[in-house]
Image: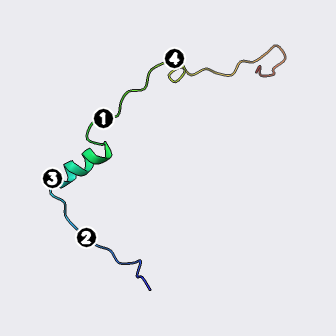
Amino acid sequence: MTDYRKVTCSTWTPEQLAEHLRQIGADKPPARRPNNGFETCITAPKQGRWGRYLK
């Protein structure tokens, strides 16, 4: 039977950490998403003549 509660602890050198970050693609900031205007604008719901919200 395997013991799943076994914990191993190791210390990585800065070179190992840099190599791991490079392999997973986290060594540089993520690419910016194109701004098409919809993601940054916030609109409130519009209300019609009789107090009902418009679709």
Query: Distance of mark 1 from mark 3, alpha carbons?
Result: 19 Å
Identify the disc placed on residue 9: 2
Left or right placement of residue 15 versus residue 20 in this view: left
Secondary element at image label 4: loop
Residue 40 rendering spot, x and y as whole percentages: 50, 22
Identify the disc placed on residue 44: none
Q: Which residue is mark 3?
A: 14
Secondary element at image label 1: loop
Which circle, 3 or 4, is nearer the viewer? 3
Between 24 and 33, the one lying in front of the other is 24
Q: Quadrant of the N terminus?
A: bottom left
Please determine whether, in this image, residue 43 is positioned above or below residue 19: above
Neighbourhood count class around disc 1 (C-alpha, 10 Å): few under 14, some 14–19, many 20 upward: few
Which callout, 4 or 2, points at the residue further toward the start of the chain?
2
Residue 16 rendering spot, x and y as whole percentages: 18, 55
Q: Which residue is mark 4?
A: 37
Secondary element at image label 3: helix
Which callout, 1 or 4, points at the residue further toward the start of the chain?
1
Query: Distance of mark 1 from mark 4, alpha carbons?
Result: 22 Å
Q: Which residue is mark 1?
A: 29
Query: Distance of mark 3 from mark 2, alpha carbons?
Result: 16 Å
